[in-house]
Image: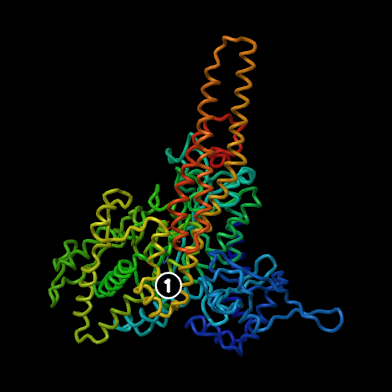
């Protein structure tokens, strides 16, 4: 196997290497220029590229092609067309034109459009994104595309992502030019997304309607063992899991996905896969493909991969760490602190820009990871709290404090510059200690945004980060471009920015109650539920941000806001209905059957021996009858809460009802059912238990 990896890696990708080999020199040059500069494709070369792509794909076994896009459902979409084109009688040739490559037409009417559909035509267009490589999968040529409405409004997550990459590039280059960098032509925003997931046996999965319909367990008493022994984290891989991971790696490598690290995670049956970082749009595509293959390959092994944020109560949930950095096309990482003070001045200014961006747009950062599934994870167990804050490590924090206070930093021999601002000291990279409780942490030469949920498309968090930082860069460049004394202006700006945003820096325990209190005193947002968070989305300052940087129009923003609320309500609604069905059709009848059985046993005993001790039977009958009656009542109450919520016409009020009324009703029902599970005989309990799900893989 080891020998084969370099051979199979990327073998199904229409990569740069394949393009160079297969395209005429001029066409290749023109295409790579388009990719490197982010410009639109020259139509005259499209036919040549399309033909080369088709020939290559057919060699790889493809018969069809599809435009592959990322509608606002959060998952990917595709529609396959074959290459066949009839010639004469009962004959076909394989054809694929530049027009078909560049643009696809798709009926958009069934994708969420958040009101865009009402105002515009239902038709949607997909447009080739030449910056993401095409690939062959399951006999089909996949062409990564953006998806928009007839009038050009983005109906997907990719279009605003590409626009946000352009925005941070445009503003960031202004800063670099000021620091005398005239070589860099494009900023490359890099992302590495560490992906957590759970594995469950397919047979057990098939017996749980909650897993099938909602991806998480809605009932389930804790197993005798959880993760308290910490024996699963980084523990040896079980044979079956190891075989699954090997298959998964091979499939991903063929698609050119740099799957690098795999290990057991904290919770039983929880694992992680980390790729090597790459340009954001590729990282997004590849993360979506990784999630798809995690599920697909699991099936081959009689397993199911759970990507939900919180499949099980009481053990860790699954997240995704979005490692993010700004590099130049010349290969420099702008978040690398460097060794010399001059470089550090640039680094510290960029750091200030990011600190400012995250503080100014805490709400958008929170919204970018807010949805029903992630609400169960934020603040629980190992996951970050709902408060956005930044951890930069002790040494950097000391440096920032000394800049703000105008005192010299103790760790270095610092002189004082004209404005009384100490010169920037050097510091060691590895002193960025890893505070695992921080939602946004500097880890040496990148930031790690840790609030993301495991199931989510990582586009939105990156759209927000890129755009918010672009805005900081813009404000900085506006000041610095007209400054008379550049060095002094940089020092002043760095100092003022840090001083204005100190409140967002926090290096303590993010999970503690004291932090919630302190964060409130600092005026930081603590948006505990998604519904609460979504209300901030179209605040004027946020709308202005997206419009100013050409990332989203007001119409696009409003449509997304509507989809946020709609999605939330739909997800909770499905969960409520699933609970009602499981309780009324499976669980309550099962407990009744067990109670009847115990009653029969007691009667039989009493018939033989009238003075025999049946206190055990009596106690079981009484306790279970009482709990089952309560469960039944709670189920009826949930039914009422659900139908009341569903009737509300206003999308925001409806989501509020699901959040404030339906979820508490679900929790109450669950509490009675979970209390009955450990005292009902195994033979009667209709569901695999937490023990079965987590320890029998
Ligand atoms: P952890 O201890 O959190 O697992 P790692 O050092 O293993 O941290 O890196 C985690 C992820 O960060 C990997 O996906 C890696 O490719 C990514 N990463 C490393 N450097 C960068 C960078 N400059 N930009 C973006 N992501 C990066
Ligand atoms: Mg990490």
Q: Is residue 10 left or right of residue 492?
A: right
Residue 679 in the image: x percent, y percent? 53, 29
Residue 623 in the image: x percent, y percent? 50, 27
What residue did someone put label 1 on? Answer: 189
Q: Residue at x 28, y 62 (%)?
A: 504
Examine the rendered structure and indicate whether residue 212 appears above or below residue 171: above
Mark 1 and ligand 1: say if the CB distance to the nearest ligand atom is below 8 Å. Answer: no
**Occupied quadrant, residue 691:** top right
Q: Residue at x 57, y 58 (%)?
A: 249
Q: Residue at x 28, y 79 (%)?
A: 476
Instruction: Bin the neighbour count of mark 1 within 10 Å (Cα to Cα): few under 14, some 14-19, many 20 and up.
Output: many
Examine the rendered structure and indicate whether residue 80 appears above or below residue 386: below
- Report how many numbered discs are placed on residues in the image: 1
State which quarter of the image contains the C terminus.
Answer: top right
Q: Nearer the viewer, residue 529 or 374?
A: 529
Residue 195 in the image: x percent, y percent? 49, 57
Q: Nearer the viewer, residue 552 or 324?
A: 552
Q: Nearer the viewer, residue 662 or 90?
A: 662
Examine the rendered structure and indicate whether residue 315 appears above or below residue 248: above
């Amino acid at each position: 196997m080891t020998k084969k990896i370099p051979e199979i890696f990327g073998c199904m990708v229409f990569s740069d290497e394949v393009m160079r080999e297969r395209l005429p020199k001029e066409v290749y040059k023109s295409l790579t220029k388009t990719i490197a500069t982010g410009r639109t494709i020259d139509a005259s070369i499209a036919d040549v590229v399309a033909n080369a792509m088709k020939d290559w794909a057919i060699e790889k076994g493809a018969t069809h092609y599809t435009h592959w896009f990322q509608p606002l459902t959060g998952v990917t979409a595709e529609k396959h067309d074959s290459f066949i084109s009839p010639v004469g009688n009962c004959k076909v040739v394989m054809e694929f034109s530049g027009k078909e490559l560049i643009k696809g037409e798709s009926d958009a009417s069934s994708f969420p459009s958040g009101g865009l559909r009402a105002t515009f035509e239902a038709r949607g267009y997909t447009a080739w994104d030449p910056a993401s490589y095409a690939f062959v999968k399951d006999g089909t040529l996949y062409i990564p595309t953006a998806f928009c409405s007839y009038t050009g409004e983005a109906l997907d997550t990719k279009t605003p992502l590409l626009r946000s990459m352009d925005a941070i590039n445009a503003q960031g280059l202004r800063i670099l030019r000021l620091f005398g960098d005239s070589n860099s032509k494009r900023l490359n925003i890099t992302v590495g997304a560490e992906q957590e997931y759970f594995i469950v046996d397919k047979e057990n999965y098939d017996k749980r309607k909650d897993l099938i319909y909602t991806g998480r367990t809605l009932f389930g008493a804790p197993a005798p063992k959880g993760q308290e022994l910490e024996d699963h984290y980084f523990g040896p891989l079980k044979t079956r899991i190891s075989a699954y991971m090997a298959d998964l790696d091979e499939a991903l490598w063929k698609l050119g996905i740099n799957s690098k690290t795999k290990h057991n995670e904290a919770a039983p049956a929880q694992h992680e896969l980390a790729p090597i970082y790459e340009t954001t749009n590729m990282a997004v595509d590849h993360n979506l493909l990784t999630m798809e293959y995690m599920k697909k390959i699991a099936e081959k092994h009689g397993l199911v991969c759970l990507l939900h944020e919180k499949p099980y109560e009481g053990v860790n949930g699954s997240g995704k760490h979005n490692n993010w950095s700004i590099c130049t096309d010349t290969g420099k990482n702008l978040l690398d602190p460097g060794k010399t003070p001059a470089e550090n001045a640039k680094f510290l200014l960029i750091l200030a820009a990011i600190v400012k961006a995250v503080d100014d747009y805490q709400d958008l950062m929170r919204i970018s990871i807010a949805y029903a599934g992630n609400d169960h994870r934020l603040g629980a167990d190992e996951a970050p709290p709902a408060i956005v804050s930044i951890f930069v490590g002790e040494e950097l924090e000391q440096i920032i404090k000394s800049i703000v206070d105008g005192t010299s930093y103790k760790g270095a021999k610092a002189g004082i510059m004209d404005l009384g601002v100490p010169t920037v000291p050097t510091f060691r990279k590895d002193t960025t200690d890893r505070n695992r409780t921080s939602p946004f942490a500097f880890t040496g030469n990148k930031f790690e945004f840790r609030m993301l949920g495991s199931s989510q498309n990582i586009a939105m968090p990156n759209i927000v980060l890129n755009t918010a930082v672009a805005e900081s860069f813009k404000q900085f460049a506006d000041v610095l471009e007209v400054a008379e004394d550049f060095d002094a202006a940089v020092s002043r700006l760095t100092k003022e920015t840090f001083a204005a945003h100190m409140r967002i820096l926090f290096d303590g325990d993010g999970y503690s109650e004291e932090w919630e209190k302190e964060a409130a005193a600092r005026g930081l947002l603590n948006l505990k539920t998604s519904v609460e968070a979504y209300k901030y989305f179209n605040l004027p300052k946020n709308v202005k941000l997206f419009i100013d940087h050409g990332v989203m129009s007001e119409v696009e923003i409003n449509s997304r806001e509507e989809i946020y609320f709609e999605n939330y309500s739909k997800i909770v609604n499905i969960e409520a209905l699933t609970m009602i069905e499981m309780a009324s059709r499976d669980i309550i009848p099962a407990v009744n059957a067990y109670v009847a059985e115990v009653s029969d046993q007691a009667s039989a005993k009493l018939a033989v021996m009238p003075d025999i001790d049946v206190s055990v039977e009596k106690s079981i009958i009484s306790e279970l009858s009482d709990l089952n009656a309560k469960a039944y009542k709670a189920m009826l109450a949930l039914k009422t809460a659900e139908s009341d919520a569903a009737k509300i016409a206003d999308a925001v009020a409806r989501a509020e009802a699901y959040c404030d009324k339906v979820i508490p009703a679900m929790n109450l029902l669950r509490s009675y059912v979970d209390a009955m599970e450990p005292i009902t005989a195994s033979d009667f309990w209709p569901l695999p238990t937490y023990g079965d799900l987590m320890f029998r893989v």
